[in-house]
Amino acid sequence: MIVGQQKPFDEIWEMVKGHKQLTVFGCNTCVAVCHQGGNKEAEILASLLRMRATQEGVNIEIKNGGIERQCEHPFFESAKDLLGESEAVLSMACGIGVQFVAEKYMNTPVYPALNTTFLGDVKTDWHFTEKCQACGDCILGVTGGVCPVSRCCKRLFNGPCGGSSKGKCEISKELDCAWQLVVDRLEALGKMDDYEKIAPIKDWSKDRAGGPRSFKLEGF
Amino acid sequence: METKTNSKLEKIFKSGAMAVTSECGPPRSSDPAHIITKGHLIKNHVDAINITDNQTSVTRLCSLAACIHLKLEGMEPVLQMVVRDRNRIALQADILGAASFGINNVLCLSGDHQSFGDHPKAQNVFDLDSMQLVQTVRHMRDEGKFLSGDEIKKAPNLFVGAAANPFADPFKIRVPRLAKKIAAGAEFIQTQCVYNLDKFELWMKGVVERGLHEKVFIMPGITPMRSVGMAKYMARAVPGMDVPEELIKRLSGVPKDKQAEEGVTIAVEAIQRLKECKGVSGFHIMAIEWEEKVPEIVERSGLYPRPVVG
């Protein structure tokens, strides 16, 4: 899922404090799972902003609401009136949702409440880790199901660098060395011989480097 | 003796002699005087001089320009290239540029992560990895083609090296990783600084068992310790560095003003022992900001005078 983290409160306040009306708008799927941008978090953030406005003697009317997903048109039906009447929207969605709202409401300023941080998993209710960079050309089939693109800080394709130490990455003792994990998996699968196959040079045109990506289903 | 390039290093390896290389770090300045001086300090005692490429991710005068300065002074540089800062377009362009100045050697590296350096907020590139850079240089040289398949009118003729760290984890893939680098096209290997000689010899045993020493010239890295403080720092803070406790104890056991001398002696002893290790073809002496000690280490190790090759 997409993981995001709320921006520092002061940064959010600086973005929105000039408006007379603001809607804090939650996105109740991915970013709700990481407790950062769901409808509940939108409610809490709206309260905090109201308190700040009172403290600073700024006059803003702050509403809150939310939908299941800010990246698909049908979900917006229930929020039509709320968004239509808003002077500005503080979107609690990932960057996709923020842009989707901006595209739908051409004349309404939309601000991001979150920094979209990564595509990751839910290790525990409170711990999320990056697992994919959407490079567009998945190689998990030959790396024992461990992604070196997202999990090796040098995205090496042919094995651990000289900084791998006791299973950890050279940049942080908190970070697993992705290639240690690859090797552990290959060993568990009895496929250590695969380690010596040289990974071909990557086609990054399928990644961000090739420009914004899209695809259309034919005959749908 | 058949050589593929004009590299002096290749000629020395293939003559059967032990090769000696050293390395110099370029200055954080546009004034090249410093690196030229360093080169002159060691040039008669080594066969080739590596020029580091923004080592530890700290911005410096570029490796290629520094290599050119040494080349113009009649020295034999080894161009270190990391894949951290340049994509395949820039890497191939720099390889052509190096060859155009008669630079004969390249060492292909990943590069330290930028979080260690002076620009931790920089983007990193890693378009290729170090192994793929080895492949790239060999492809350019041997096929006379760019990665794109386009022809290169005059192919760059470089002797291609790579690094190995026998002390990094997981240990069990360190010999296979070397095999992979050889398969990618590495012709010589310079290793991480060797302090744990037993572990190095264990790695070399695995290398020899697979016959890899017959396919590549291996040069253990030797870095003299200047003080017990340096030894402790390297043990504690440098990832993938293996500094045994006995070495720290030995340095602690001598007075502070004699520790540097002891460090040099330890380096000389390491070379003398590893000269006997099957599969070792030379030494890469990295006296970090202490280049003036290189001649002494080379002489005391019995590696001087250096052979003359045509």
Image (cartoon, helix red, strand yellow):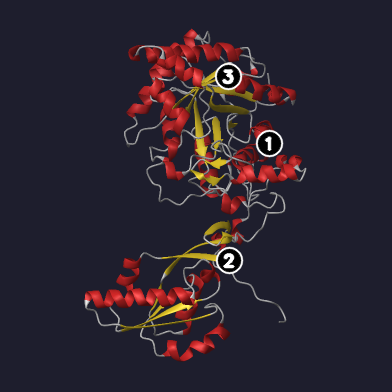
Q: Chain of mark 3?
A: B
Q: Which residue is mark 1?
A: B180
Quadrant occupied by the C terminus of chain A = bottom right
User: Which residue type does callout 3 highlight?
Assistant: Leu
- Image quadrant of residue A15? bottom left
- Distance between the alpha carbons at the discs numbered 1 and 2: 35 Å
Q: Residue furthest right?
A: A190
Q: Which residue is mark 2?
A: A1
Q: Residues within 10 Å of mark 3 (few under 14, many from 20)?
A: some
In this picture, is A73 found above or below A120?
Answer: below
Q: Give SS at disc 1.
A: helix
The residue lying toward the viewer, choosing from A44 and A100, is: A44
Q: State the image coordinates of residue B197 (x, y, percent, origin top left).
A: 58, 19
- Distance between the alpha carbons at the discs numbered 1 and 3: 23 Å
Q: Give SS at disc 3.
A: helix
Decide if residue B310 is in sight here: no
Q: State the image coordinates of residue B58 (x, y, percent, origin top left).
A: 40, 39
User: Which residue type does callout 2 highlight?
Assistant: Met
Q: Nearer the viewer, mark 1 or mark 2?
A: 2
Looking at the image, do the residues carrying marks 1 and 3 touch, with CB atoms under 8 Å apart?
A: no
Q: Which residue is mark 3?
A: B197
| Residue at 41% across, 13% down | B253
- Distance between the alpha carbons at the discs numbered 2 and 3: 47 Å
Decide if residue B133 is in sight here: yes
Q: Residues within 10 Å of mark 1 (few under 14, many from 20)?
A: some
| Residue at 59% across, 61% down | A134
Q: Chain of mark 1?
A: B
Sequence-first disc among 1 and 3: 1
Q: On the rendered structure, is A117 left or right of A55?
A: right
